[in-house]
Image (tube, rainbow, N blue to C red):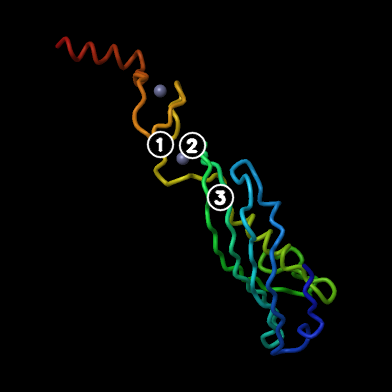
Amino acid sequence: MTLDLRDVIGVPGHSAAFDFSPELSQLLSESVRDIQGTPRARGVVRNDAGILTMRAEVEIRLLCVCARCLKEFERDISQTIAVTLSENEATEDDPEYYRIEGLSIDPGEIIVTELILRSEYRELCREDCRGLCERCGADLNLGECDCKPETDPRLAKLAQLLDSE
Ligand SMILES: [Zn+2]
Ligand SMILES: [Zn+2]
């Protein structure tokens, strides 16, 4: 999506609004399998006394895979993204700014970049997911499996010594 900023750049007090469905396939990863439904991004680029900012409310539903139990689950994300835009070449490498070239921006590109920066390295179906048994593969959230807990042979020996006293 291209947002025309001809009437905003250099015109303090002006703004340009947007409301569209961003293309988010770049968010797909080992832990994010799919984007569900229609993601939505609403926002505005504003010129406040010569400083350009973009603010967007993003609503997405992701289909994730739990890193521990491998179960698929949906996660609704609603995030506010606020960035400062700059036409100044000096800000090229400054992570605080998004560089604008020309008289338009692609809000979708900025949104994807920000979402990737904020994304979780791995997703969990819940904070205390117990995962799968390493030996039989049973889902431990559903209860204990029949596997005996692995004991370190050296500790077993120590336990015997302590027992015999
Ligand atoms: Zn899980
Ligand atoms: Zn097991």
Q: Nearer the viewer, mark 3 or mark 1?
A: 1
Residue 164: image quadrant is top left
Q: Label 3 sits on what residue type?
A: Glu
**CB atoms at circles 1 and 2 under 8 Å apart?**
yes
Q: Residues within 10 Å of mark 2 (few under 14, many from 20)?
A: some
Give the residue at mark 3: 120
Q: Nearer the viewer, mark 2 or mark 3?
A: 2
* Cα–Cα gap, marks 1 and 2: 7 Å
Q: Earlier in the sequence, mark 1 or mark 2?
A: 2
Does the beta carbon of the residue at mark 3 sit less than 8 Å from ligand 1? no
In the rendering, at what x and y percent does residue 108 appear? 72, 64
Residue 32 against residue 9 in the figure, above or below: above
Give the camera-side residue of 8 and 140. 140
Left or right placement of residue 12 versus residue 77 in this view: right
In the rendering, at what x and y percent does residue 18 appear? 70, 75
Secondary-structure class at tag 1: loop
Give the residue at mark 1: 130
Give the residue at mark 2: 68
Does the beta carbon of the residue at mark 2 sit less than 8 Å from ligand 1? yes
Q: Label 1 sits on what residue type?
A: Arg
Q: Tell me what residue is drawn at x 69 percent, y 64 percent.
A: 21
* Cα–Cα gap, marks 3 and 1: 19 Å
Q: Label 2 sits on what residue type?
A: Arg
Q: Residues within 10 Å of mark 1 (few under 14, many from 20)?
A: some
Does the beta carbon of the residue at mark 1 sit less than 8 Å from ligand 1? yes
In the rendering, at what x and y percent does residue 165 appear? 14, 11
Q: Earlier in the sequence, mark 3 or mark 1?
A: 3
Q: Tell me what residue is drawn at x 70 percent, y 52 percent.
A: 25
Q: Tell me what residue is drawn at x 74 percent, y 69 percent.
A: 91
